[in-house]
Image: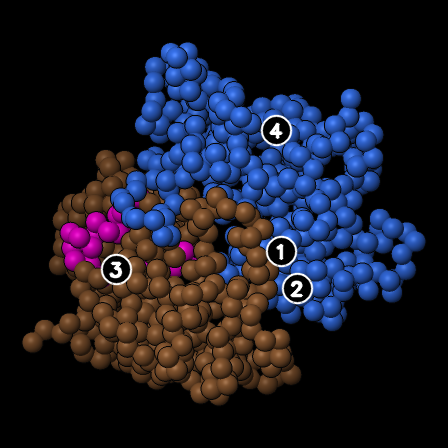
Amino acid sequence: MTNTRTVLEVRGLDVEYVTADLPVRACADVSFTLGRGEILGVAGESGSGKSTLITALTRLQRPPAVTTAGEILFHGRDGAPPVDLAALDARELRRYRWTAVSIVMQSAMDALNPVMRIGAQFADALRAHDKALDKRAAWVRAAELLAMVGISGDRVRDYPHQLSGGMRQRAAIALALACRPQLVVMDEPTTAVDVVMQRQILAQVLRLRRELGFAVVFVTHDLSLLLELADRIAVMYAGRIVELGSAAELYRAPRHPYTQGLRDSFPPLHAPLRPLSGIPGSPPDLRRPPSGCAFHPRCARRIEGCDARLPLLEAVGDGHQAACLFNTREGAGR
Amino acid sequence: MSPDYVLEARNVSKHFTVRGSLGRSAVVQAVQDATVRLKPGQILALVGESGSGKTTLARLLARFYEPTSGEIALRGEPVAGGGRAARRAYHSDVQLIFQDPFGSLNPLHRVRYNLDRALKLHHPSLDGDARLRRATALLERVSLTPAADYLDKFPHELSGGQRQRVVIARALAVEPKVLLGDEPISMLDVSIRLEMLNLLEKLRAEDGLALLYITHDIASARYLCDDIAVMYAGQMVESGPKEEVIAAPQHPYTKLLIESSPDPERAAGDRDELFEGADELGEPPSLIDPPAGCRFHPRCPFAMTQCRSEAPPVTGLGDGHWARCWLHQHGRAGELARTTHAAAMARRAPQEVAT
């Protein structure tokens, strides 16, 4: 059966970095479903596996990273059976790049060719997927796409270095939308810009999503930003999703101690100030992950068994999942 | 009489000459007529967008380069010129911490050497044993304990947070009176940023250290500092006690900056409404040819004719709070509290926006 409301289903995704000494499992048993037009935020710190997840989803990973298990099921608009992106070869994948799934990287300079005019780069992408489009029409379309993100159409003749950092990032978003993808994966797209530009970019993503209906996987270390932007948020720690729920639920009632610690690591902008302590310790070395729950050495609510048993992601509320023994124990006690 | 301020930048400007296209040179007015004053034990946050001149101002205060005009004063005494010895003496009072803890330590040497070198330079009278005791004590101060475990580590063996602690420990080795922190936590993981802010607060409380905290993160500035100064396009536009500046900004740019900062508290409402009107907020101007009058006027929803030609004077608002905006001179400052940047922008007449 095909589900027309779902655009992406990730099931049991494992990604390992295969090295000579110790293999590192950077993504472990990652599963989630993304609705059509939904914005899913992925929050995590360095080493949490969030970037690994993105390169696996978009099949942009390079050795030594290898997807060792799992499926990435993409559901097209036409209601045809889903396609497992993880199983496609390079040639088959090409049909899905840009038109089904596209990516916006942290640094627009990584996505834009520095020695090509902006318009030519758009024209390349457009014409690769629409052979009937002539060069002139492609440049006109490029100008329209730039206008969509508030950049004057005559900037198509500019080189990337002639645009400001914020404009380049917006141009990269316009480029990612050029072939009307159904899913756009964004990897820290606002980390390199300051707060005013960040807000502009987020406002534009929301407006374009409303107009074009694409879904977004938005990866960042900044949970405070996701709480404003995302429909649902997945929190990653040491390669696993430890909590998944609506932005409002995660903020009001986080059910994993790491999520709570992360939330309380952002001082409030207006609410009364109180001393905050962050999360003691530092993220684990994935070459030697802690036993049981990877968060247990830093966890203030650690109970017996946390260092031995790996907690699974399980329902703790309506559409809300968390992987913490504390929840299981509480539930059992009731 | 002892001076009130431990470190001051008095009306400093810094202009850089850059080579433009076709061999023409241009002058970048990175900082224009900025004044900053730090009292002992005070934490002042300097906020603004990238390119606003925050880092240049910090480097002027650290005497990385001399101001084009204006002066830097330490304990009320202007400092200028002087040889290496004079600079070293200055740096035993004023230390700068960079954003990047990876680039701030010598990667070829162990923590012990990195600390020892600073101690040797600034405390030549100490012998090797005394320096080792100092280094151990410094690591303990920044909570890298047991210190013996860290002394023989190389920088690459430490996490980002530990490395930034070593950078702070090295800055403290010279027993400075002032720390200048240029985005000292922005490259660290979120969960350990607070530890660093709490450490800086502890150093202020225990040593009476003055701190200039440069950031674009208003929420962390509010958590740590006493006062906030706001820079825009190389100029100071507003300064005052943090709660006043954040709750009731008195410059339209400060207002834009605060309304643009993530605030999970307000996330409960409708998202499209929350971001309405925020998809065109403009960008800072080029500092080679900055706008005449108030430099913010092209982006300002409240701009008047005068704003385009005349630079606004400073209006004192009591309690050390001041702003540089014509609204105050025209009795219009009340408008700031009654609207948001986006709503005011939408109301601004289209022909005004065009000019």
Please give the range of residues in magenta.
B195-217
Q: Secondary structure at mark 3?
A: loop
Type of amino acid at the residue the image marks with label 2 = Gly
Q: Colour of chain A?
A: blue
Residue drawn 39% across the image and 82% down it: B330
Q: Which residue is mark 4?
A: A32
Above or below: residue A327 compared with residue B103: above
Which disc is residue B162 wearing? none
Q: Is residue B162 left or right of residue A126?
A: left
Q: Position of residue A178 (x, y in %)?
A: 76, 53
Q: Colour of chain B?
A: brown
- Report if the CB atoms under discs 4 and 3 are less than 8 Å apart: no
**Mark-to-mark CA distance, 1 and 2:** 9 Å
**Mark-to-mark CA distance, 2 and 4:** 33 Å
Q: Which residue is mark 1?
A: A204
Q: Which residue is mark 3?
A: B226
